[in-house]
Amino acid sequence: MKHWLTNILILTLWLGNYLNILICKGEDRVIQPTGDFITTEGDTVTLDCTFETTSTSYSRTLFWYKQEVNDYPKYMLKSFSNTAENAPEFQKDRFDATINETSVPLKIQKLQLSDSAVYYCALSLFTLLR
């Protein structure tokens, strides 16, 4: 499990020619409801993820990851401002998340059996200096 956490930090800290200062305080956290969704193929489901932070002067980016049985979590998308950027294998017409004031719900449309997995959200707070 340690190796994917390292990758998350690398993804969070790498921003090309900018200096990225990552802020992480004990008061900052994400909250995901536990439990299973039972639904049928073709339906739409929305997975909740709320966050609490005391840092108001930093940019907020929320990430979604999908973990299938006996596999490591795979990056799905990130949401910041009013923008979401999806990984190539997670098409925007099926997987979408828009960050708002305190949450970033993940909407999965046209459900397929292969969508069965555990989904995680993660919060990153940072500021960019040129």
Image (cartoon, rainbow, N blue to C red):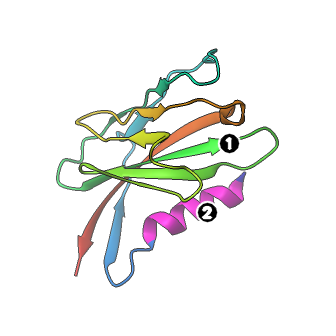
Q: Give the percent coordinates (x, y) of residue 25.
A: 36, 48
Question: In the drawing, what numbered circle is on residue 21?
Answer: none
x 57%, y 53%: residue:
75
Residue 1, compared with residue 18, is above or below; it is: above
Identify the residue under disc 1: 67
Q: Is residue 10 magenta?
A: yes
Q: Image point 55% across, 30% down: which residue? A: 110
Residue 27 lies in quadrant? top left
What predominant SS class does the magenta segment belong to? helix
Q: What's the magenta region?
A: 2-13
- Mark number displayed over residue 6: 2
Residue at 65% from the left image edge and 35% from the top image edge = 115
Q: Secondary structure at mark 1?
A: strand
Q: Which of the image's four quarters has the C terminus?
A: bottom left
| Mark in front: 1 vs 2 | 1
CA separation, marks 1 and 2?
16 Å
Point out the tag, 1 or 2, that comes first from the N-terminus.
2
Q: Is residue 84 above or below residue 16?
A: above
The image position of residue 46, as x and y in percent, is 46, 26
Label 2 sits on a secondary structure element that is: helix
Residue 127, magenta (yes or no): no
* Residue 61 in view (yes/no): no
How many numbered marks are there? 2
